[in-house]
Image (spheres, grey):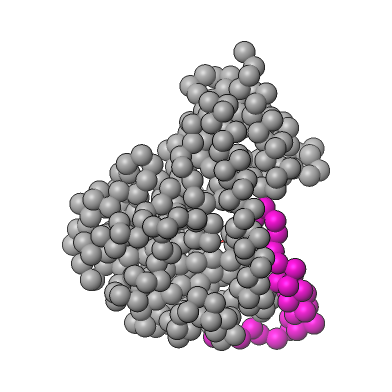
Amino acid sequence: MPTGPAPQPGILEIAPYVAGEAKIAGVERSIRLASNESALGPSPKAIAAYRSLAGEIHRYPDGSADELREAIGRRHGLDPARIVCGAGSDELITLLLRGYAGPGDEVLYSRHGFLMYPINAQTVGATPVAAPERALTTDVDALLERVSQRTKIVFVANPNNPTGTYLGTAEMARLRAGLPPSVVLAIDAAYAEFVNRNDYEAGAALVDRAGNVVMLRTFSKIYALAGLRLGWAYCPPAIADILNRLRSPFNVNAPALAAGVAAVEDVAALVHAQAHNQRWLAWFSERLAALGIPLTPSVANFVLARFPDNPRKNADAVFAFLQRHGILTRKMGAYGLSEYLRITIGTGEEMERVAATLGEIMAAR
Ligand SMILES: Cc1ncc(COP(=O)(O)O)c(C=O)c1O
């Protein structure tokens, strides 16, 4: 048998990322709560900006994303020269790994941290190292204990997906203080805008105080532009320089750049989306508690719900029951949390439907 071209060592060991399901066979409009997408959709101004680009798509985009970096800088009080835009924060995770880790190096993350960290670490030949958690929350001491000579990057999603828990400002500063300056601390704040806690900071202040901290942000969650693929990193100048050298020259497409500017400037839409999430996250959490379904205390736009060890009401059974009722949630087996489902906060009507449907299965004998 002739053998085909061999991929680089280690590539075949990568378990491909499995995205949340978007369709149920035979159901025209399912309730999609599997991918932590926005409940409300984008700002109408972002949609208008996207559409306004339709006649211009024969042109290359602005490869330096000047307007968007300036808009982000104004909104967040940050130096645009230290912002790098990417095709989703996923791309920025990959670029950081390409820049700072390779074969023989270790990439540290929290046991139930976002799956793209270990997956992407493997794509550059590095070894992912998971640190255990306490109560499904990132444990700073456990991370610090696992730092070795080989550690190049520590990824912390804050708040974390899929657990919904977060590290307070002091804990994150303690993590940074315990790391050698040669190790990159990547704070992935994809869900930052949803957090309503006094002891939380998305990470920019830490970036300003240190030469080894990067904050990652996305337009896929509260700004509801997941389909356009848009994220950004705020970095020390030397790290921004590395990401800029590695990225392809036109990595963010023109409609995404235009929609991003409009989205970040529409503060009213942001505040509306925050209020919606706070209201329905609290409402849904209370309903699940009343049904006897334990939850992690989420500060993001989803909950992680634990189901009983009863074949008729366990996570698999509940997933299938919800699916039969047109509701898509996310199974958590890939995270080693197979007794849990992750459920995104959708519209009020959707959350009422999910709560009622969960009520049916939990009440059944
Ligand atoms: C913690 C975290 N980081 C990054 C991402 C990726 O976001 P993007 O759509 O910007 O690539 C996600 C998406 O679910 C996420 O949960």
Q: Which quadrant of the view contains residue 30?
A: top right
In the foreground, 48 or 126: 48
Q: Is residue 197 visible?
A: yes
Q: Where is residue 300 in the image (x, y as percent from the top left)?
A: 52, 51
For the point 19% across and 58% down, the residue is 148
For the point 67% across and 23% down, the residue is 360
Residue 128 versus residue 217 in the image, above or below: above
Q: Residue furthest top?
A: 365
Q: Where is residue 62 in the image (x, y as percent from the top left)?
A: 61, 86
In this rendering, the count of numbered labels is 0
For the point 42% across and 58% down, the residue is 198
Q: Position of residue 23 (x, y in %)?
A: 71, 44
Q: In which quarter of the image is the C terminus?
A: top right
Does 192 appear in magenta? no
Magenta stretch?
37-65
Q: Is residue 127 visible?
A: no
Residue 58 versus residue 221 in the image, above or below: below
In the foreground, 202 or 182: 202
Q: In this view, does 233 lie to the left or right of 75?
A: left
Does 48 appear in magenta? yes
In the foreground, 21 or 74: 74
